[in-house]
Image: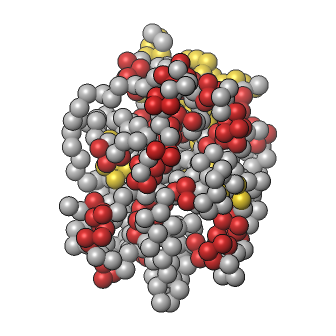
Amino acid sequence: MKRKRWMTLGILLLALVMVFSIVGCGDTPANEENNNNEDANGENGEEVPEETSDIPEYGNYVGSDACQGCHSAEYEAWQGTWHSVSMQTPDMLYDDIFDGSIEDGITWNDLSEGLGNPIMIDEDEPSGIAGTKDFVVQGTEVNDVDGVYIYHLGDREFEARFTAEDGEILHTVDVEVFGHGNKRRATNFTNIYDGEGNYLLKYQVRYDRDGGNWSQTLDGEPTGGVWADRNDVRRWDDNCGGCHVTGLNVPANLEDRDLIATELVADMAVGCEACHGPGGDHAADPMNEDLIVSFSDMTTKQQNDACEQCHTRTTANKHFDPEVRWGDAYGFLPGGNLEDHVEFILPTWGEEWRRVSADGKGRGWHQWGFDLQLGPKADWACIDCHSVHGANDEGQQFREYGSSPEVIVTMEESCAPCHEGVYDTKESIREVMDGRRGWDDEPEFSGRAMQHTFRLDDEGRVIGLPEEEWPEENNWPWLIE
């Protein structure tokens, strides 16, 4: 494909993905070496502009429940998707992290010698803290702290325990713990009221490591689970909340870093307003359809930008100094232009790094937009194949192509009309969608298990961009001016 054509393509993404669509970030250790200067916090090392504008105004969000009255069918269908459970409040946390049903019976409180789950303050430290640290917790000075552990008191109640080097508990404070991601790879976070935001906890549940093989099971169920060291010192509200909730109030967060998640967001889910924009004005005047964004009024690029605000990988938000703010697409509203708000991770043509294979295929979750634009379906919309609101009985968000009103179908039924007799079973579809296919001897070209380039070479290998089309500069072709 000629570069001129690449320049005309919009940024596209298959956004409403299958059962594994909502997962935690940081799928490989953040301190792994790579060829794109990604730093220990998972940030891409490309130069990004310093803060270029004032903090974007927070929208008039009201939450998905406010939409239910007039849009009950869509609301009910949405509740069956993984978007609706992208977060767990304390009462929703999965039982198996407390009852020892994963990894040889280890419970939450067994972690770190029975002290609980450490919060991540310094990387690679069993206690979460390198050396000792002083805290001011709700006005109380707590000095020479060797570790901060989150202990489960029972009945979904928790306390943060600040301990000395000899294990003495110096101070405790009641906290709330939230779940981020889904059961297959669930990260937990909390606020310890020291003015630094919501901390990620050190150990997370992983069903896709050490014997787990969820991504390749046909029934979508995990086959094993472990407590995995997250090895990540990022804060939830700085690096994760922009995509796992709706209406994260950044101005309020900057003013008061002690606010917990439920005090910061309009919707503890990827809700209606994530795709349709803030709905407060529309809810107050529901007959005025101009007050809400509809996909039917968007161009294909606008539709996919709305999806790609989360289903892609970014490295910086253009509204903030990258030293103090995250890469989520804060400031973007559906119907807008995503490139005005974020910097994307970049390829390194001919060389691999942990996020991108040597030919551009994605290696991390949420990179299906990059994949799609490298292949022959770059002019497709996400919603050509994926449902906006509903999921089938297997939790997959597939629609019958071109159906109106939308008809929810299985993966096979979605693909078969165009590929009958070739890709019309789960096994055949998963095989051709496997980005690792054919690259056993050249692992630098191996991608993710569920690629979206839809491109095969003459040897039947799943590829990204053919070598003869690699741009001279290390950038995505559609972003080259």
Name the quarter where the N terminus is drawn: bottom left
Q: Is residue 344 above or below residue 74?
A: below
Q: Is residue 328 above or below residue 415?
A: above
At 34% from the left and 63% from the top, the residue drawn is 9
Please state which of residues 346 and 143 is positioned toward the viewer in this rendering.
346
Residue 262 location, quadrant: top right
At 22% from the left and 73% from the top, the residue drawn is 472
x then y, percent, for residue 256: 42, 18
Please state which of residues 182 and 199 is positioned toward the viewer in this rendering.
182
> Is any atom of residue 418 visible in this view?
yes
> Is any atom of residue 28 visible in this view?
no
Q: Is residue 35 above or below residue 431?
A: above
x then y, percent, for residue 210: 65, 61
Please state which of residues 287 and 247 is positioned toward the viewer in this rendering.
287
Answer left or right for 338 relative to 423. left
Residue furthest to the bottom: 458
Q: Is residue 335 above or below residue 36?
A: above
Answer left or right for 180 relative to 77. left
x then y, percent, for residue 248: 47, 29
At 76% from the left and 62% from the top, the residue drawn is 219
Answer left or right for 371 relative to 390. left
Residue 83 location, quadrant: top right
Residue furthest to the top: 139
> Which color scheme did the rendering employ for the protein?
secondary structure
Please state which of residues 471 and 350 is positioned toward the viewer in this rendering.
471
Name the quarter where the C terminus is drawn: bottom left
Counting labels gives: 0
At 30% from the left and 63% from the top, the residue drawn is 8
